[in-house]
């Protein structure tokens, strides 16, 4: 029995992952660009982080869609760390981020505020699913190569 | 924004989202029901655009920043068409799930838009 090669482009579940990442990237970018243009001085640290997050989401989306596994792994790990660190800070020490409010739906909120609560916790769950997906791809291709 | 219409918009988007996700996970490929459901959501968004243009002129301006509101609304309005194109190009159960995800994203954005319009200060 010959193993079929794992397609570099993700299929099935992977496509849904790419779609959700794309929507999150679009939403995060739009919001970030707007916040920076409109009121950067209100929370420069938080909004700068927001911009970085948006760029990382865009790269993660492209990497997942085109099958660039290493880039996908790096970006997903980065955003998981980001949402955990920034999410924690936004709740226990918002002052460090230059925020005076915790409200994840507020005008100073970013995509990682309160672990992405303003985005239904998608920024928290998505990278975990992304990592699981990458692991699945890795195992499948290793199994195929081992035959 | 108008509370009643917002409830219709968000409620419909949530229902359509759940419907498409469930049908997709159940193995249904995109079909008339799921595709037209997204069209309904898009029509409601287009109506929302009209409302948002007319409302300030008749005494219902946003409390929040109008530019921020429009960024959300325009972004939300392009998502259903993109999702439908995706579903037409690739007719699998997962694209039905994508249709659902798109509708749920619209629901969240619409809720956020309502906040900007009525609660958040510019």
Image: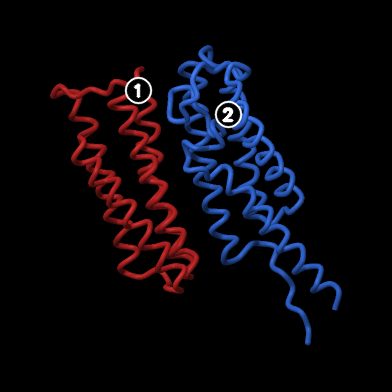
Residue A50 has which mark? 2
Q: Nearer the viewer, residue A82 or A8?
A: A82
- Which element carries disc 1, helix, strand or loop? loop
Which chain is red in the picture? B
Q: Chain of mark 2?
A: A
Residue B35 quadrant: bottom left
Image mark for residue B91? none
Residue B106: x, y in percent?
Answer: 37, 46
Q: Indicate left or right for A44 with B17 as reference.
A: right
Residue nearest the observer in this picture, B39 or A48: A48
Q: Residue at x 34, y 18 (%)?
A: B121
Residue found at the far bottom of this picture: A1
Instruction: Say which residue label 1 marks.
Output: B120
Q: Chain A hue?
A: blue
Q: Is residue B42 left or right of residue B108?
A: left
Instruction: Say above or below: A32 vs B81.
Output: above
Instruction: Return the x and y of residue A6 as percentages of the image width and height.
Output: 72, 69
Q: Nearer the viewer, mark 2 or mark 1?
A: 1
| Image quarter in which the N terminus of chain B is found | top left
In the picture, the quarter occupied by the C terminus of chain B is top left
The answer as to whether the residues below labels 2 and 1 share one chain is no
Which residue appears at 27% of the width and 23% of the height?
B62
* C-beta proximity under 8 Å, tags 2 and 1: no
Name the spot of residue B96 as percent of width and height, x first.
43, 64
Q: Residues within 10 Å of mark 1 (few under 14, many from 20)?
A: some
Outermost residue, right side: A146
Gap in Å between the C-alphas at discs 2 and 1? 19 Å
């Amino acid at each position: 029995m010959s193993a079929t090669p794992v397609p570099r482009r993700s299929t099935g579940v992977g496509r849904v992952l790419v779609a959700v990442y794309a929507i999150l990237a679009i939403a995060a970018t739009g919001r970030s660009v707007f916040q920076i243009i409109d009121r950067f001085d209100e929370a420069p640290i938080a909004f700068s982080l927001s911009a970085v997050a948006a760029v990382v989401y865009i790269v993660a989306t492209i990497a997942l869609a085109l099958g660039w596994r290493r880039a996908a792994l790096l970006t997903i790990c980065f955003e998981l760390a980001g949402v955990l660190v920034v999410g924690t800070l936004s709740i226990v020490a918002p002052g460090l981020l230059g925020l005076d409010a915790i409200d994840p739906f507020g005008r100073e909120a970013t995509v990682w505020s309160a672990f992405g609560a303003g985005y239904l916790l998608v920024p928290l769950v998505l990278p975990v699913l992304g990592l699981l997906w990458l692991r699945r791809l890795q195992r499948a291709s290793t199994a195929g190569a081992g035959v | 924004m108008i509370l009643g219409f917002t409830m219709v918009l968000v409620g419909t988007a949530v229902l359509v989202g759940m419907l498409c996700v469930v049908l997709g996970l159940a193995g249904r490929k995109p079909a008339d029901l799921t595709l037209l459901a997204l069209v309904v959501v898009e029509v409601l968004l287009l109506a929302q655009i009209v409302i948002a243009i007319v409302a300030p002129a008749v005494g219902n301006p946003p409390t929040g920043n109008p530019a921020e509101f429009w960024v959300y609304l325009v972004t939300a309005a392009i998502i259903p068409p993109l999702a439908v194109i995706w579903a037409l190009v690739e007719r699998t159960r997962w694209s039905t799930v994508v249709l659902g995800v798109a509708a749920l994203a619209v629901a969240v954005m619409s809720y956020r838009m309502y906040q900007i319009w009525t609660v958040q200060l510019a």
